[in-house]
Amino acid sequence: MKRILFFCLSLILLLSNACIADVHVTLITASIQQKLTSDDALHRLIVGNERFVQNKRHKIDFLQQAKHTAKSQHPIAIVLSCIDSRVPPEIIFDQNVGNIFVTRVAANVINKDVLAGMEYATKVAGAKLIVVLGHQSCGAIKGACENVKLGHLTQLLDKIQPAIQQTEKTLGKKDCHDSHFIDLAAENNVKDVVANIPKESPVIQQLVNEHKVKIVGAMYDVSTGKVVFLNG
C-alpha cells in the first residue's frame, strides 16, 4: 500500500514539474499554448521582463527557432505598444520567435485595423492575453499635450486627448514640460485603451466574458527596462 501511495505521489510531482517546465520553455508549441491560461501567459511575460532587467536573458538561436516556426505559430499573447525605438516587446519580455504577436503604433492607440489584428491573434491563433504597453517619456503623449498638428498625426493625437484631460483634472493643471504629467497621461492613455478594446470589439468582448482572454495594461520604464503591469 505504501509503495502504491509513493508511486502515485511521485507521478503527481512528475506531472506537476512537467507543467511548470512547459510554462518556462523558450519556444511555445501548440500543446503548450493550449494548456496555458491568460494568467500563465502574463506570468511568462513578467518573468521574461525580470530576466531582461537582470541581464539574464535566455540564450536563443533565433535562426534555428525561425526554422522551427516556419510552418506554424502558437503565440501566447499580443502586445500593442508604441512605435518608440526604445521599446521592443520581444526583447524586453525576453520572448522567442513565434511566442508573441506585436502591433506597434504611436501612443499604442487603437483603430479598426489594430482591433482586426487582435481578433485574429486571439480568436483564430489562440493567444490568451492582450497587453497594452505604454512607456515613460512618450513623444506622442507630449505631442497630444501640446496639440501638435501634422498631417495624419493630427487625428492620432486627438485620440489621446481624453487621457490628457483626465491627467489635467487629476493634477490640477496642464504642464506639457512636466515629465510627471506626461508619464501619468501615458498611463491614463493605456487605461483608456484597455477599457475601449472590448467596447469596440464584440469578438474580444465575448472572449473576455468566456474567460478565454484577459486584457491588461502596462508601463515600461525606458531608463531601467522594467515593465509595471497596471492590472491583471
Image (spheres, rainbow, N blue to C red):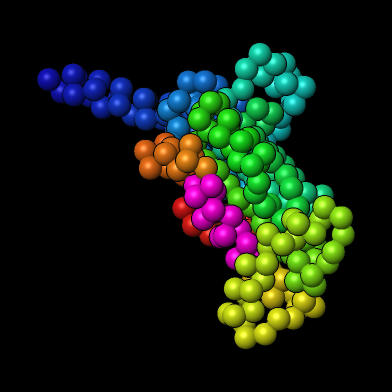
- Answer yes or no: is residue 93 visible: no
Q: Is residue 40 left or right of residue 11?
A: right
> Residue 66 location in percent, x, y?
73, 21
Quarter of the N terminus within the rendering: top left
Q: Is residue 110 above or below residue 223?
A: above
Question: Along the line of sight, which residue is nearer the eye, 24 or 116?
Answer: 116
The quarter of the displayed image where residue 70 is located = top right
Q: Is residue 32 left or right of residue 75?
A: left
Assess whether residue 195 is covered by the magenta stretch.
Answer: yes
* Residue at image location 68% in from the left, 67% down from the top: 161
Q: Which residues are magenta?
A: 186-200
Q: Is residue 211 above or below residue 108?
A: above
Q: Examine the residues drawn in magenta and state their main secondary structure.
A: helix
Q: Is residue 63 left or right of residue 191?
A: right
> Residue 24 location in percent, x, y?
54, 34
> Residue 77 location in percent, x, y?
57, 37
Assess whether residue 204 is covered by the magenta stretch.
Answer: no
* Residue at image location 52% in from the left, 42% down from the top: 201
Question: Along the line of sight, which residue is nearer the eye, 48 or 77?
Answer: 77
* Residue at image location 58% in from the left, 80% down from the top: 170
